[in-house]
Amino acid sequence: MTVKKIKNYLQEYSYLKSIQSLLHWDMETMMPSGAIEDRAARLSYIQGKIHSHITAKEYKNLIKELESKKLRPLEKKLAKELRWDFDLYEALPEQHVKDLSHAQTIATHAWASARKDNDWKSFRPHLQKLIDLKRKETGFYKAKKPYDALIMLHDKEYSSDEINKLFGDLKTGLLELTKKVKKDKTFVKVKDLKGPFDIKAQKKLSAYAAALCGLPPEHSRLDISTHPFSINISPLDQRITTRYVKDNLDSLSSTMHEVGHALYEHNLPREWEGTPFQEAISLSVHESQSRFWENAIGRSREFCKFIHPKMKDLFPKAMKGVSAEELYQVFNKSVPGLIRVESSELYYNLHIIIRYEIEEMIFNQGMNSEDLPEVWNEKYKEYLGLTPKNYSVGPLQDSHWAGGAFGYFPTYTLGNLISGSLYHQMKNELPGFSKDIEKGKLNRISQYLKENIHSKGRSVNAKDLIGELDVKDYLSYLSEKFED
C-alpha cells in the first residue's frame, strides 16, 4: 500500500520532468534565439517545483513509512534507491537549484554562439560561474573528494580512485594497440569516402538506421541540433537529434549512438513511472547502450556488409568502387583527431581521459577557467600528438560544461568498458549473433538488451549485469576488430 502511495505521489514528479525535458528539447532545436532569457526563467521555475515536490515533508514521511515495514527484496531495493535520490535532492537548497538551472540555460545558449564564432572570451565568464556553482554544490554532499560528489550524480558505483585505476589500465592497453595499428597501416592509410554527401540522402540513411535498430517512429522524432543528443519526454515520446555535414557521414554513427539512448528510455518499465525503477541504472550503463549500437553494431564488419547496398543506392558517386570490406575500414579508420564526436573508436577514450583529468584539476586542485585552454592544448599534444588550431575545435567543442554536466564525461569510457563486456556476453548467449547483424536482423539483439537491462530500471546495478568492471573485455573487443 505504501508503494502505491509513493507511486501516486511521484506521478507529478514524472509530469514535471516531462515538461522540463520538452522545454529543453525545444530550446536546442526550435526556440527563437531571442527567447533565451524567458526560457531560462521558466526552466528555473520548473526545476524549483521539481525540487520542492521531491523534498516535501509528505514525501519524506512516505519513504520513512516504507523503510519501517518488513520488505521483500524488490521493495528493499526500491526503498534504497528512493532514499538515495531523496538525500541528494534534500542536500541542495532550492535557491541553489534555481540558480544553477538559470546559469546552465544561459551558458548553453552562449556556448552555441561562442563555438560558432570561436569566441572563448565571451563564454569563459559563463563557464566560470558554473564552475563556482558546482564547487559550491560539492560542499552540500558528503564525498571523499570534491570531484567524487559530481561523479556520483551520474554514476554512484564508481569513485574517482576506481576510475583512475581503470583509466590507467585502459590508457596502457590503448597505447599498445595504437602502436600495432599504426604499424599495420590497414586502418590508417584507408582513404575517406569523398563527398559531398547529399543532406536529404543522409536523413534517409539516419531514419533507416534508427528503424533498423528498433526505435519505433510513432514514438520518436529525429531532428537537427548543434550537438547531437537524446532526451526522454516520456517512454512513449523519445526525441533524438543528429548533425548533418556535407563533407562527411558522421551523422550515421551519431544517429545510432542516440538511438541507443532512446531505446533504453523507451523500454523502461512503464508501471514504475516516476520511481527509480523507471530510470536507467546509471549514465555509464546508458552510455554502454549508445556506444554498443554505434560501435559494436554500427562499425562492425557484418553491419558494413549489410548497409553497403543501401549506401551505394543513396551515395552512388561516393561509393563507386568501394567494397563492403573497404567500407568497414573507412568506418574504423584510426588516426588521431581533435574532435571527440568525430573520433575513431580506437582514440575516442583518450579524448574522455583528457576531459576527466581536466575536471579533476578543476574540482580537486582548484584550477579555474582562465587556465583551461592551455592545459587542454598540453594534454592533446601529449596524448594525441595534436594541437587545436582554435577554441572551437578545442575546449568549446562539447556542450557538457555549458550545461554544468561536470562528472558526466567519465561515464562515456565506463560505458565503453561495459559495452565490451556486453558484446562478449551476447556473442556467447545469442547463437548466430554475427549472422543476424550481417542480415540486418537486429530484433534479437534489441530484445536481449530490453530483457536484460532496459526493463529492469534501477532494480539492478551495473555489477549485477557484468560483475566487477575491468578493461580486459573491452580491450579484447578492440583487438578482435583491429588485429583481425
Image (spheres, rainbow, N blue to C red):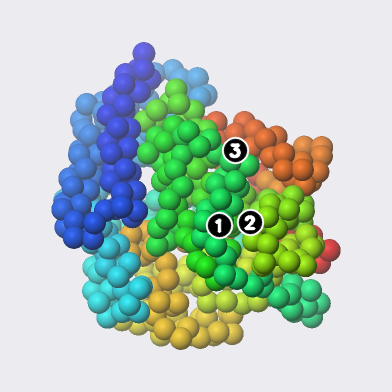
Q: Position of residue 482 (x, y in %)?
A: 77, 66
Find residue 304 and report its image quarter: bottom right
Q: Earlier in the sequence, mark 2 or mark 3?
A: 3
Residue 86, image x, y percentages: 32, 38
Q: Secondary structure at mark 1?
A: helix
Q: Specify the amino acid type for callout 2.
A: Leu
Q: Nearer the viewer, mark 3 or mark 1?
A: 1
Instruction: Identify the image quadrant of residue 6.
Output: top left
Badge 2 density bin: few <14, some 14–19, many ≥20, Cα 10 Å:
some
Question: Residue 314 — which label?
Answer: 2
Q: Earlier in the sequence, mark 3 or mark 1?
A: 1
For residue 170, side relative to residue 339 (left or right): right
Instruction: Give the image location of residue 40, x and y in percent.
Output: 20, 54
Residue in front for this viewpoint, 86 or 266: 266
One can see residue 460 in this view = no
- The amino acid type found where label 3 is placed reads Gly
